[in-house]
Amino acid sequence: MIKTFIQENATIADAVSDLNKSHSKIVLILSADRKLLGTISDGDIRRGLLKGLGLNSPITGIVNRDVLVVPPNMDHQMVMQLMVANKVQQIPIVDDNHNVLGLHLWDEIVLPLTPALRPNLMVIMAGGEGMRLRPHTENCPKPMLHVSGKPMLEHIIEKAKSEGFSNFVLSVHYLGHIIEDYFGNGERLGVKIDYLREETPLGTAGALGLLKRVPDVPFVVTNGDVMTDIRYGELLDFHARYDAKATMAVRVHEWQNPFGVVQIKDLDIIGFKEKPITRTHINAGVYALSPDVLDELIDATHCDMPTLFERLQAKAKRTVAYPMHEPWMDVGRPEELIAANAKVDQL
């Protein structure tokens, strides 16, 4: 059965939409008569976004046209061997005329329905005061504000648990007792939860210096007010693949100038751009870090994540960007809390 496909006149946004619906990590590009023209993987999209392409850009710049395919009568054991040999997790099924008949997925052939447990720790920064969300946060810590009937923090933990994470550390400060009373040791959710208690706000990285035990393997850090469909396990896999010390999830932010722009050199007008769109990458508030990164922190001293990344860069340690295309919301203002409640079913 074909999981997802689009035609070659589609946009990157179309490909992202299909990927998010199917979770197959691949889109098949078909001609009008359903012949296979190429594929787009999750990685192809992330590389395209990192190169400056936008969601409205055509897919032609990211299509992989050199596609491994198999005939319909090939047995699953041989398909598995091809996947391992070629380091792929999806192989289209085509007939002699290159018409698409279906798609083999590694997950469906091999993996069990329940996710494999991950030993990696997840640290959630939940100590902020949420001043921009007043009066909602006068008597409630920001990560405990309800979205679709439960705290944002609970959404984050449940999503990570669905990917195999079971060990969590919550960094708390403002009204931290409310968070601790609600989650306890995590037993109610079927996970293990410990706490870092900030006496004074230590920033989005500084609290990591309070960890009682240095993790043995890379770990995930996320802000407690970020609602997203990012796959934390894939972020860690990306971090390992590129041999990074620190990985930051980033999103493309597009801003359209409401005016026509005049291009000037000295006094001469050399061109015009009508309401140009500027694309930048913004920090999405989700990170993967290697254990030795903690050596860059000073005990009980304030440090934000960008500062930690700068310290690593100053020592020529590799920091990389993980370009996101998944739904994402930073719930920092009342209107964003309203929007999160309206959109949570899409995350």
Image (cartoon, rainbow, N blue to C red):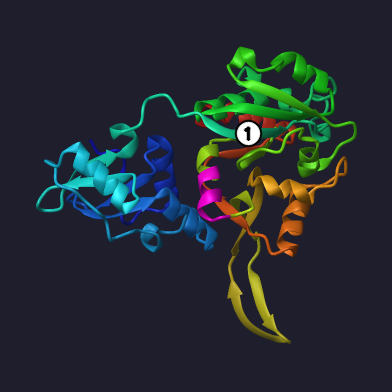
Q: Relative to 34, does residue 267 appear above or below in the rendering?
A: below
| Picture layout, residue 175 above or below residue 5 | above
Q: Which residue appears at 28% of the width and 34% of the height?
A: 109
User: Residue 338: within the magenta?
Assistant: no
Callout 1: SS: strand
Of all residues, the one furthest to the right in this rendering is 200
Q: Is residue 237 magenta?
A: yes
Callout 1 amino acid: Leu
Image quadrant containing the N terminus: top left
Camera-side residue of 161 and 152: 161
Q: Where residue 232 sits in the image (x, y, percent)?
A: 55, 38
Return the x and y of residue 206 as percentages of the image width and height.
Answer: 81, 42
User: Going 54% across and 49% down the picture, which residue do you hit?
Assistant: 240
The foreground one among 345 and 217 is 217
In the image, the segment drawn in magenta is 236-243
**Residue beneath the point at 29% across and 51% down:** 85
Where in the figure is residue 251, as x and y percent of width and height? 59, 50
Residue 8 placement, left or right of 282: left
Relative side of 321 to 144, left or right: left
Residue 42 visible to the viewer: yes
Relative image position of residue 99 (x, y in whole percent): 15, 49
The image quarter in which residue 121 lies: top right
Decide: is 344 above or below 14. Answer: above
249 displayed left or right of 7: right
- Binning the other alpha carbons within 10 Å of mark 1 as few (below 14), some (14 to 19) or many (20 upward) gives some
Q: Residue at x 68, y 30 (%)?
A: 337
Residue designated by label 1: 121
Residue 186 sits in which quadrant?
A: top right
Whether residue 6 can be seen here = no
